[in-house]
Image: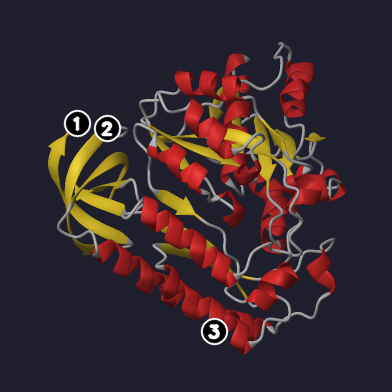
Amino acid sequence: MKAVVFTLGCKVNEVESASIMSALEGLGWEVSEKLGYAEAYVLNTCAVTREAEKKSRQLIARVKKFNSDAKIFVCGCASEKSAHSFEERGVTFVCGARKKEQVVEEFCRLYGGTVKGLPYPKQVKSRAFIKIQDGCNNFCSYCIIPYLRGRETSREVEDIIKEVKTVSSPEIVLNGINISAYEGGLSRLIRALSGVDKRIRLGSLECSAVTEELLEALKGLKDFAPQFHLSLQSGSDAVLKSMNRHYTRAEYLDKCAMIYSAFPSAAITTDIIAGFAGETEEDFEKSLSIIEEAGFARVHAFAYSPREGTVAFKMKDVPPEVKSKRLHMLLAAGKAAAEKFAQKFLGSVQEIIAEEYSDGYTCGYTGNYIRVYVKGRLCAGEKYGVGLTGLFKDGVLAEINGKE
């Protein structure tokens, strides 16, 4: 019997899907994460934007084309938000974002077997994503996720360390819906991981999480990947206030300066929303200018999508054509910033972990998140010293300097 566990959305969704995959394998199923013929499908959905929610619903028709008689199990944020929109499409089972173990329980009820809770995730990528936290209490005015994921909860340090010890991947990424809110402080967890002999990377951080204490704890890791995905959303104080983001432009830039002081080669990556409700041209120019001022290594820009049920849904929206224009300007500025950041390291030797092979090149990432292309096939999961030679595609070209 074959099951497909297909995921839309964030890395937390991917981790939870990987746990479902592990549980189903324990029940004797052949499991894949790629769409294809199967007797059963688990669809882990997303609702961060209207488009993501639409794609989540469209998945039902897609999998029925592979097997119209298959059983379809739906979970995730889109089904938490609107379970009936999936139930009316004739699926087998629907649950939400908060109790995804119910999917496996339903498998056991229908097919037999016993599973207690969700096991540690199946490793399906070169990097192992370790979920340390769930939920969010921030209630940014544009975001539906706190209403769907619920309040913040954190895993015990001991359980996280136990999972880390089971991971064979040379790199782990600590992730969650809001890891900045890790109970007892993120620094506490980082100090507990100081003996781990793997590259450790952080998931997305809020501005408030960057403290001298955290930076000192990160310096104590054996192999820290100095990449900080520091959520921005807007460079305008007026828009940040309207978004219910609890920092100013100046405070954000101060945090960037703290990071560069502690880790001179650090990459700071970010998210910026184009055309948030009420955003003026002056507001937008501040978002555009902060890209260079902060020295971002990568910018994830996207157009604002009003979400029913959020505070911002009632605010005056920006015309679609204005959003589109601003988005293209942000993307262009982000591309230029990424190239400028990568150029600083040309001629240097960096360590990468080989991840995937495609079109004659093996790709991997440096600790500070520069995407590296090496000609030929390298061994996935192995560390390599490489010399960065020039800009190439969405990253840099490199030659092997030595192998660890």
Name the colouring of the figure.
Answer: secondary structure
Rate crowding at label 2 as few (under 14), some (14 to 19) or many (20 or more) other CA atoms within 10 Å. Answer: some
Q: Which residue is mark 2?
A: 382
Quarter placement of the C terminus: top left
Is there any visible trace of residue 69 in the rendered image?
Answer: no
As measured in the structure, the alpha-carbon distance from the residue carrying label 3 to the one carrying label 1 is: 45 Å
- Left or right relative to 350: residue 267: right
Q: Nearer the viewer, residue 210 or 283?
A: 210
**Residue at 60% in and 66% down:** 233
For residue 404, which numbered disc appears in the image? 1
Q: Which residue is mark 3?
A: 285
130, above or below 356, in the image: above
**Residue at 77% in and 27% down:** 102
Rate crowding at label 3 as few (under 14), some (14 to 19) or many (20 or more) other CA atoms within 10 Å. Answer: some
Q: Nearer the viewer, residue 199 or 43?
A: 199
- Left or right relative to 181: residue 204: left
Q: Amino acid at mark 3?
A: Glu
CB-based contact (under 8 Å), mark 2 and mark 1: yes
Residue 395 percent location from the top left of the image: 30, 59
